[in-house]
Amino acid sequence: MIDLHAHVLPGVDDGPADLPAALELLQAMAGQGITTVVASPHSFDDRYQNLGPAVLSAVADLQMAVDQAGIPISVLPGMELRLRPDLAALLRTGQALGIAGTRYVCVELPHREYPYYTERAMYELMLAGWRPILNHPERNRGIQQKPGLLERLADQGVLAMVTAASLLGQFGPVAEQLAGQFLQSGAATMVVSDAHDVKRRAPLLREALERARAYGKGSQDEEQDVLRHKVSSGPPVR
């Protein structure tokens, strides 16, 4: 299985606090059958200001420790980027990173609001050659109040991925219902673990994919397709 979004880097955000905790989390993910995970620390939000070069270095160090520990999983670099008007410039200069060296970008909105500039910022990202993937839209309060907002983004070309724990009811009934609704309608096409640790935010991707099959969305073709697109190949085409 491929997990396009999880917080596995030690000591950089609200994921594992140190290397032993990171290795424990990755061991649990490997036990689920996950063979590839994109390390996606929070970046450019109110709490965390991780930068691209530091994330690349942290991923390399973690992969070395994973190999030494004999954990059968590959860790690839990425970021969970808070949407902001200058995001395209941050990506162009390498301060922000796409998913695993591709032109796909993991983007999140503030949980409590749907910013007025969302559609414009997404459009400008795509105009600059990036393909945004909106993370956990089912947990955004503005989208919860107006689910049609995600449908409009999807019509614009924005992809979306829902959190495994949402599908399993761990973020409440509204997030659970919307996660299923978005998968069923095609407004969201991917499921990710968004794991942070082995207890509070455990990796539940296998269980979530079983639940997703009820909506006719049980494969991981989209995740594999994302990883096929490298930066050198230019903008992803749909």
Image (cartoon, helix red, strand yellow):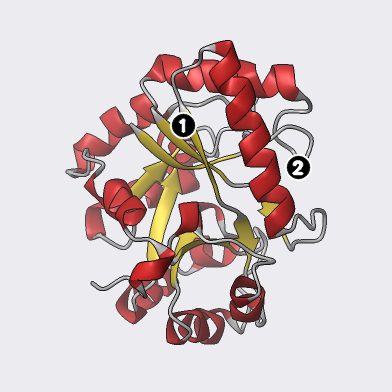
Q: Residue furthest right?
A: 47
Q: Which residue is mark 2?
A: 13
Please state which amino acid type lies under the numbered disc 1: Ser
Q: CA distance from mark 1 to mark 2?
A: 20 Å
Few, some or many residues within 10 Å of mark 2 (<14, 14–19, 20+): some
Asked whether, in this view, residue 56 is left or right of residue 213, the answer is: right
Asked whether, in this view, residue 3 is left or right of residue 43, the answer is: left
Residue 221 is labelled as none
Up/down of 163 relative to 62, above or below: below
Q: Position of residue 28 (x, y in %)?
A: 51, 16
Q: Is residue 28 visible?
A: yes
Q: Position of residue 226 (x, y in %)?
A: 34, 55
Q: Residue furthest left?
A: 216
Residue 74 is labelled as 1
Q: Is residue 135 visible?
A: no
Q: Secondary structure at mark 1?
A: strand
Q: Are marks 1 and 2 in contact (CB under 8 Å)?
A: no
Up/down of 39 relative to 228, above or below: above
**Residue shown at the point (50%, 65%) measured from the top left:** 143
Corner quadrant of residue 80: bottom right
**Residue shown at the point (67%, 33%) measured from the top left:** 61
Few, some or many residues within 10 Å of mark 1 (<14, 14–19, 20+): some
**Residue shown at the point (54%, 39%) measured from the top left:** 194
Q: Secondary structure at mark 2?
A: loop
The one of 80 and 62 positioned closer to us in this rendering: 62
Please state which amino acid type lies under the numbered disc 2: Asp
Q: Mark 1 or 2 closer to N-term? A: 2
